[in-house]
Amino acid sequence: EPNEALTFASLLASDASVISALHKRCFSQPWTTTDFSRFAHAEECDGVVARVGEVVAGFIVIRIIADEAEVLTLAVDGPWRRQGVASAILEEAMAVAAGRGAATLFLEVGVRNDAARALYKGLGFIRAGRRARYYTTPDGPEDALVMKRDLMSEAVQPFTDAPLEPASINSVE
């Protein structure tokens, strides 16, 4: 249980090895330190790293092209799951994307990933399509649902139903 505030910072190349290790703990086909370093340097990409104290609790990487943004990956480390961290990270990323001119945020989620699908639905994402056999999992191929969220409507408000008290969530530039 966090006893310090959840803080946000932009993804930096210096975060790449820590982020890569977290990604490896969360996904069966993890991305490399080099991948995350490239994202940190790519003009069209942005990332948000969430920390509790000095500990990285989770992160997101998004790509923004013209007026559309896409979640490339989102991960929350085991000890920090089910505490509103993913919601807070997504809210921060939506603000970053909107600030860079994106009107819509897209993402893919595995059809069997009920927890993530519920999270995204709760944040106002709606189904926009389906990609057959998009993911390779230990249980075999898995379809992905494509979901989208309008970033320009008045509905873009901080998610306040998370277990962390909103007053304890502080943004840092």
Image (spheres, grey):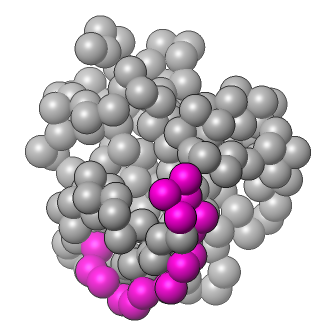
Counting the numbered discs, the total is 0
Q: Position of residue 167 (x, y in %)?
A: 21, 28
View extreme (front): residue:
139
Could you say which is closer to the camera, residue 73 or residue 158?
73
158 lies left or right of 38: left
Q: Position of residue 102 (x, y in %)?
A: 52, 78
Instruction: Name the dominant secondary structure of the magenta segment.
Output: strand
As displayed, is residue 167 above or below residue 157? above
Q: Position of residue 36 (x, y in %)?
A: 77, 47
Q: Is residue 50 magenta?
A: no
44 lies left or right of 168: right
User: At 56% across and 85% down in the image, what residue appears?
Assistant: 67
Q: Is residue 131 visible?
A: yes
Where are the magenta residues, as a range? 125-140
Which image quarter: residue 72?
A: bottom right
Q: Position of residue 113 (x, y in %)?
A: 34, 59
